[in-house]
Amino acid sequence: MKGIRFMKIEKRLGLKWQGLLVLSFFIFHFSFSYAQRIPEAIEYTEIYDYLEELTTDGIIRSNAAIKPYTRDQIARMLREAQSRDSLLSRRQKDDLQFYLQNYALECDTLPVYYSYGHRHVTQWITSVSNLSLADPSLHILTKDKVFKMRIRPILGMDLYANKRGLLQHRWYGIDMQMDIAHHLSIWGSIRDNSWGGQGVNGSKISYGWVNNGSGLSPVPALNNIPGSQYKEANYGGDFSDSRGGISLYTWWGSIGVQRERIQWGDAQHCSNILSAHNPAVPMLTIQLTPCRWFQFDYFHAWLPSNVVDSTYYYVEQEQEGVTGREYRPANKFMAANMFTFLPCKYVQFSFGNSIVYAERNVQAQYFIPIAFFKSLDHLFTKGINSENQNSQVFASITVRPTDHLRLYGSFFLDEFKFARLKPSNPEHNPVSYLVGFNWSGWPVRGLALRGEFMRAYIACYTHSIKVLDYTSNSYNMGHYMGDNSQSIFLQLSYRPVRGLRLMLDYTRDTKYRSYGYFRDYIAGSRVENPIIAQKPFSGKIWCNDIINFRAVYEVFNNCYAHVDITYNNARAYAPTSPRIDGEDRGWNADGTSRNLAGAELQSYYLDKYTPAYFQGRTLTFTCGLSFGF
């Protein structure tokens, strides 16, 4: 009887028995998976901070070098904490039960809304599926648990007020997530954002302004506000943020296409490898987790270059004998991989490499996940007189020598020559390093002290060919401060009760003399003082001190209110030393470099690196409410 059924299936599908054997093996091989692979947005900082607390306390293990976590990963970490609840404080247990409701679908259940210690359930059960309204969001789980869906509204507003006026940030949208047959995850969201406010027309708080000879142009400011590509608006700025993806997964890995913000490198304030500071980009992703102590990540991304290709244009319809040309941006791509080893719960080590390339089309060699991309670049560009593509090497390490203490650091190598290590060589390798610590849970449970220190040498993240800079949408993909800079960050935080977090931060960002990355020659003429040979961290041109108090309360899952009081002192300085070739000291009307000095140069740097709303000494009050962050 079984043989007859097998023959019928074979006949219907048009398969031979060998093909059915392979198909059966494939189905059997992929049948041991149980959860969806949907990334949890990094902006949902409350869950990430809670998991960081549990990791530092030695209760769970997490790979802090690769973010965002998937919702499946977060659910597994929460269940791990649940299995060790004897180590949790009362407040941590309350937080655990609270967050488990948000990841109920990942545990094949429906959420139950908890409030003030009482259980409130709104649930409608049909003959086919279960529906649950909570958070506020709609959850659907079929009885056979083959199909899961989560639909969540997105709505929020932040109000900023200081001596320059009132600034409003509004956003709304919707988020949808689906999981099918325990092997396919599909998700998508749209957030429409609007900035505006009386007295601050034209403000875009992630932008500064620079006069490059053809009028004022927006450039990314030196702050940790997530970057955006604004639409033109005279009242402020609008932008939409559409994210999503599709992922095929099993218990040991996944492959997918997605558009999300990603962070590589362990950091609390801002990573110097991949910081998620730039707008999200579309990418092909692979993640392998074959065992508890190893993880492999790879992506190939399509980056917006914001650099015009003068040979690539559209021809507009001819009007009155005149034909117009609309020039298109140059193509830009990136491939990167990261190997992470967790040999024990006290040590985690990650290393990898990446390449930013700007060929006409994608290059097949960079789709090899486990590859050293610089070697491939040399192979395919050998004999070309122009510069190679832009490759990088990086590493991140985390050590937890004792419970409640976590030490971490990351290293970003943009270019390296052994000859530059000699004391007699004035040149420096363009590298960046970051070190940090997190002391949490002792002597007071819920209290944490964090600190980070970052330095980036001259020409780090930059390239002599503009389109090959380590940027996307003109935003630096590493630390937001860019090259020849330094950043210090300290934070004291306290979680007294479930859902409430109090934070006091201090940040000091310093930018030193700004250079374009010219090598030994400019337009065929040898440069007397190569940029790479300049003394790093000298000639301060900009500095910002920020003291921020923040109170945030998560009312229910994905809905929180916050209040911020921020003092900042952003100021600029004018170097008195002579200008060298390639140094940025302003622009002439024809687009050539200019040698500004004194107050005029200070004003230029201040406008370039600081949004007008935050220039000088300012005290800013912020309050906001968000559904779906």
Image (cartoon, rainbow, N blue to C red):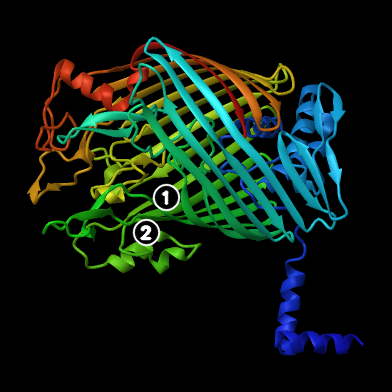
Q: Quadrant of the N terminus?
A: bottom right
Q: Amino acid at mark 2?
A: Lys
Q: Which mark is residue 246?
A: none
Label 2 sits on a secondary structure element that is helix
The answer to whether residue 425 shows anywhere in this view is no
Query: Which residue carries the number 2 mark?
Result: 374
As drawn, 147 above or below 260 = below
Q: Return the x and y of residue 570 as percentages of the image width and height.
A: 34, 17
Q: Amino acid at mark 1?
A: Val
Residue in the image at 28% along x and 40% along y: 459
Q: Return the x and y of residue 480 as percentages of the image width and height.
A: 40, 34
Comparing 286 with 348, the one in front is 286
The answer to whether residue 298 shows anywhere in this view is yes
Query: Which residue carries the number 1 mark?
Result: 393
Q: Of the two numbered discs 2 and 1 on the same chain, state the one appearing first in sequence.
A: 2
Q: Marks 1 and 2: in contact by CB < 8 Å?
A: yes
Comparing 177 with 535, the one in front is 177
Q: Return the x and y of residue 442 as percentages of the image width and height.
A: 70, 20
Label 1 sits on a secondary structure element that is strand
Q: Return the x and y of residue 573 as percentages of the image width and height.
A: 24, 18
Mark 2 and mark 1: Cα distance apart in space = 9 Å
Q: Residues within 10 Å of mark 2 (few under 14, many from 20)?
A: some
In the drawing, does residue 158 fall left or right of residue 250? Answer: left
Give the farthest residue toward the front.
Answer: 320
